[in-house]
Image (cartoon, grey):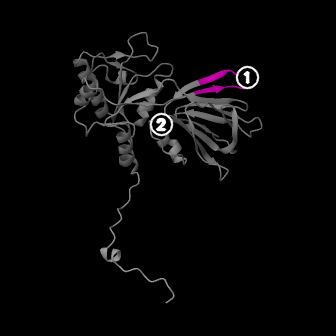
Amino acid sequence: ANEEELDMAARICAHLSSLDVEVLLADPLYEAVNERVAATRWEGEHDAGPAPDFVATLGGDGLLLYANTLFQETAPPPVVAFGAGSLGFLAPFDVDGDGPLEETLDAVGMEAEPWPVSLRMRLRCRVVDQNGGEVAKHEALNEVAIDRGNSPFLSAVECYCNDEHLTTAQADGLIVATPTGSTAYSLSAGGPMVHPSVDAMVFTPICPHSLSFRPIVFPDSCELRFEVAPDARADVWVTFDGRSRVRLARGDSLVVTASPHPLPTVLRLGNTADWFGGLRVHFNFNVRRRQKPIDPVFLNAPEEDGGSG
């Protein structure tokens, strides 16, 4: 974080402290601003001390993904995301355009009227070895991606839905995205944009060696399983929200289900208004010069006689 962002973080902490709200800071922010404000170091979701009632992030979408990693085994509290990064698609509160930070915090946390909240679906991802042992477990907010890494060969992954074999994916990789992640990596790979209120999982291939392998949207009640084929030419890698990375050897599996603990994010206007606002502002969604009205002379022109005379 730069000095301007640290100053903003210190302002948030000072304002909350003035309202008799105990401020908990996770590293590395605690190390950066603890001498400026009265705050307690928070060691994570298993900290024996008090647990946060809400989380404030000051940065971009990557910071929201980092905040998600802090709650991998427990239900996360509501998150108020201030946009101060590169994109800020998931951070609806603009530190420059929505008034002073203090007023926004007062409005969200102290007003009697409730603010709208989006319960953002998360993916519960388990890596299981060929003997059935659990190797890794992650709660992903955006997506889980399988890729071939630095191997020169296509991945060969058997894909199942509720134990029903779907296909053998021969591709650079696969993505399973949440509605939140449908506008991230999956979108770049040709997947659909899904409204954040829809409970679904988006299954998107990455550069498949087939013209007919298209993205599929599954209900959140499904269990998706991906197994590296025993005769695959190489192992594959699994990445959770672009962060943690785990190797899948031949015979290993990735099991993906909907997490019972969504990530609540506070909305500025509402689910649809915030989402479409982000699409317009950050992605220039369907930007096109408006077609000019037709000249009245063409509207009043007589119809041509199509007969042979």
Quick check: is 134 in the magenta stretch? yes
Residue 261 in the figure: left or right of residue 226: left
Label 1 CA crowd tier, 10 Å (few <14, some 14–19, many 20+): few
Query: Of the residues shown, which amino acid type is indicated by label 2?
Result: Val
Q: Is residue 109 visible?
A: yes
* Extreme residue in the top direction: 48
Q: Secondary structure at mark 1?
A: loop
Q: Nearer the viewer, residue 308 or 90?
A: 308
Q: Is residue 156 visible?
A: no
Residue 202 in the figure: left or right of residue 276: right
* Extreme residue in the right direction: 231
| Residue tagged 1 | 131
Q: Residue 48: where, in percent of width, then height?
A: 43, 9
Q: Is mark 2 in CB contact (under 8 Å) with mark 1? A: no
Query: Of the residues shown, which amino acid type is indicated by label 1?
Result: Asn
Residue beneath the point at 25% across and 30% down: 104
Q: Quadrant of residue 239?
A: top right
| Residue tagged 2 | 198
Q: Is residue 23 depicted above or below 184 in this figure?
A: above
Q: Quadrant of residue 77?
A: top left
Q: CA distance from mark 2 to mark 1?
A: 35 Å
Q: Which residues are magenta?
A: 125-136
